[in-house]
């Protein structure tokens, strides 16, 4: 990567020297705008958003329908480029790359989890999880092994040969998580990952995301639901294309329910 951003010193102890270093920034968004239908009738889906996320964070982006969540996710996920502004992903400005360059960045840096799972119906669990590894030019044997390990990681070691239609919604979403983590991208983006699931399966998916975060993966979770957002450790609220709140989640919530009270 040619153009590295200078590490921000914001939030660090300016003196003392003994403070532990904060993790590096994985995301730095600077004043991005996404304007649809410029001119009369324009929609400012993103209206000057700035955001920094450090490695290892678990951030929920929360907002009502139409607030700009998916638009922001598309920017952060390099699925689309902003009308204006900069986006540094691991230090590289990706705001004005070509489609081919963006797809390369996505493949190397980002794992996606969508509301509708987006699995390929004709492929079984193993084959679905292997796909991103195939794009990386990995040998068949290695792909198989990593895909099986990823599926075991999400508790689906017994469903390797099942096709999506032969699995529950919660299982399909776990296949999608296995696919997202298989190539070990540093960043996971989840857009309403529990939106199509019943409460119990949704909780299971959130719990897996919390485990993956505890292992050090950076996660951005997009949701309109405050109770889902509380699985994260930091909550960024978006309204009319602007960030209106950015706060730590009240406590490190466990998706598995409230902790047992001390005896
Ligand atoms: N391709 C487009 N052309 C014009 N306007 C768009 C387009 N995509 C989104 N918008 C508008 O941009 C705004 C933000 O949309 P976005 O899809 O990001 O909202 P959202 O927060 O994800 O909503 P939801 O919770 O319903 O998914 C909305 O007002 C929407 O109508
Ligand atoms: Mg949306």
Image (cartoon, rainbow, N blue to C red):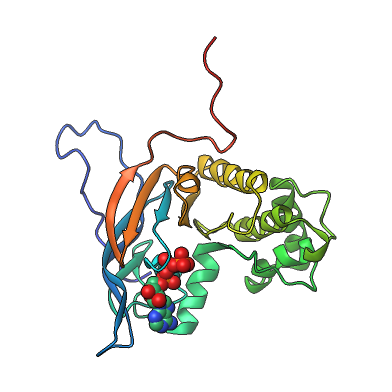
Q: Position of residue 217 (x, y in %)?
A: 50, 49
Quarter of the picture holding the N terminus = bottom left
Q: Quadrant of the C terminus?
A: top right
Residue furthest toward the left?
A: 15
Q: Is residue 95 left or right of residue 254?
A: left
Horizontal and vertical percent for residue 198? 66, 50
Residue at screen point 64% across, 73% down: 135
| Residue at 51 percent of width and 44 percent of height | 213
Residue under the point 63% across and 66% down: 116
Q: Position of residue 22 (x, y in %)?
A: 32, 42
Return the x and y of residue 62 as percentages of the image width and height. Answer: 40, 55
The relative height of residue 147 versus residue 21 in the rendered view (above or below) is: below
Horizontal side of 245 relative to 218 (left or right) equals: left
| Number of numbered discs on residues | 0
Observer-nearest of 232 and 142: 232
Q: Is residue 19 left or right of residue 189?
A: left
Residue 47, compared with residue 174, is above or below; it is below
Q: Which residue lies at the image location 73% right of the left edge and 45% below the top edge?
A: 155
Depth check: 17 or 34 in front? Answer: 34
* Image quarter of residue 40: bottom left
Q: Which residue sits furthest bottom? A: 39
Using the image as rendered, state which of residue 120 and residue 218 is in the foreground: 120
Q: Would you identify the image quadrant in which residue 204 lies?
A: top right
């Amino acid at each position: 990567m040619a153009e590295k951003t200078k590490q921000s010193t914001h939030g660090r102890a300016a003196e003392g020297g003994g403070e532990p270093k904060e993790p590096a920034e994985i995301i730095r968004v600077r004043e991005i705008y996404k304007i649809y239908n410029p001119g009369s009738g324009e929609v400012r889906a993103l209206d000057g958003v700035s955001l920094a996320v450090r490695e290892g964070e678990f951030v929920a982006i929360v907002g009502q329908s139409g607030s700009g969540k998916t638009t922001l996710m598309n920017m952060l996920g390099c699925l689309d480029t902003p009308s204006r502004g900069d986006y540094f992903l691991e230090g590289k400005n990706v705001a004005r790359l070509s489609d081919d360059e963006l797809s390369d960045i996505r493949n190397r840096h980002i794992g996606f989890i969508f509301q509708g799972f987006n699995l390929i119906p004709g492929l079984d669990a193993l084959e679905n999880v292997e796909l991103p590894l195939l794009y990386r030019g990995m040998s068949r044997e290695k792909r198989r092994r990593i895909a099986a390990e990823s599926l075991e990681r999400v508790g689906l070691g017994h469903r390797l040969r099942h096709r999506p239609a032969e699995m529950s919604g919660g299982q399909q979403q776990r296949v999608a998580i296995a696919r997202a983590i298989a190539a070990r991208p540093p960043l996971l983006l989840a857009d309403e990952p529990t939106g199509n699931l019943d409460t119990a399966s949704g909780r299971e998916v959130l719990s897996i995301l919390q485990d993956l975060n505890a292992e050090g993966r950076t996660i951005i979770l997009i949701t309109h639901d405050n109770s889902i957002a509380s699985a994260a450790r930091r909550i960024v609220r978006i309204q009319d294309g602007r960030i209106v709140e950015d706060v730590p989640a009240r406590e490190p919530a466990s998706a598995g329910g409230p902790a047992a009270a001390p005896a």
